[in-house]
Amino acid sequence: MKSNTQLLAQVTEFIGYEADLLDHKGYQDWLSLWTEKGLYIVPTDLDETDYLNTVNLALDDADMRRMRVARLENGESVSANSVGYTVRMMSRIRVLEAGDDVVIARCAMTLNELRHGKLVTYPANVEYTLKPVDGGFKLDRKVVKLLHADGFLRTVSFIF
């Protein structure tokens, strides 16, 4: 298998930047990473691919992403009370498809949250659909497949 190491490095840098923004609550900068038609998806079924016609934990278009960020920044929801700290660890980054108009990548993510003195870990596979733009990428789709999405999830006060 031959890989484009320059493209992989660019994708890895973008994924790391996005994770860093979320860990440090840089929500407005995170919003600017998206295309206007981009979708942020957290499905309840690991095998599902028809996200528009099934139940999801999140299926956010641009308006919903802005509302989610507003709730987190302004404390307008129960989940924003006592917002904890997060550390994301991204690994196993692979470019699955690369073209002039789209790059699709997948990685493993472990999100660790500390809130009220309790540490909770959320392992997931994450797939990114990226649109190449001058000097980088825009997120067109992010699908976070939590390993335990069909089980108990306590109140989530962050974006995966």
Image (tube, rainbow, N blue to C red):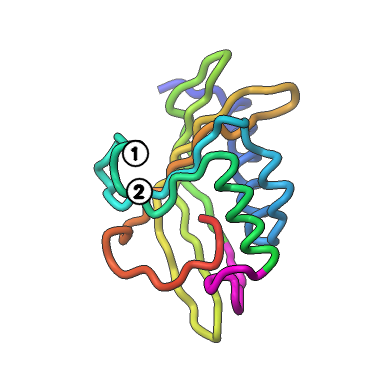
Q: How many marks?
A: 2
Where does the magenta region start and end?
Answer: 75-87
Q: Which amino acid, by three-letter code, is at mark 2? A: Pro
Specify whether residue 126 is painted magenta: no
Mark 2: few/some/many CA within 10 Å (<14, 14-19, 20+): many
Residue 9 in which image quadrant: top right
Specify whether residue 80 is painted magenta: yes
Q: Indicate the position of residue 43 as horizontal and vertical percent values.
A: 35, 48
Q: Quadrant of the image for the N terminus? A: top left
Q: Would you say residue 141 is visible in this rendering?
A: yes
Q: Are marks 1 and 2 in contact (CB under 8 Å)?
A: yes
Q: Secondary structure at mark 2?
A: strand
Q: Earlier in the sequence, mark 1 or mark 2?
A: 2
Q: Which mark is residue 96?
A: none
User: What's the CA distance linking mark 1 and mark 2?
Assistant: 7 Å
* In-front residue for pair 43/136: 43
Q: Which mark is residue 43?
A: 2
Q: Indicate the position of residue 67 as horizontal and vertical percent values.
A: 61, 52
- Residue farthest to the bottom? 117
Q: Indicate the position of residue 47 as horizontal and vertical percent values.
A: 24, 43
Report whether 142 appears left or right of 20.
Answer: left
Residue hosting label 1: 51
Report whether 43 appears left or right of 87.
Answer: left
112 up-or-down from 130: above or below? below
Mark 1: few/some/many CA within 10 Å (<14, 14-19, 20+): some
Q: Which amino acid, by three-letter code, is at mark 1? A: Tyr
What residue do we see at 43% from left, 42% from top?
A: 143
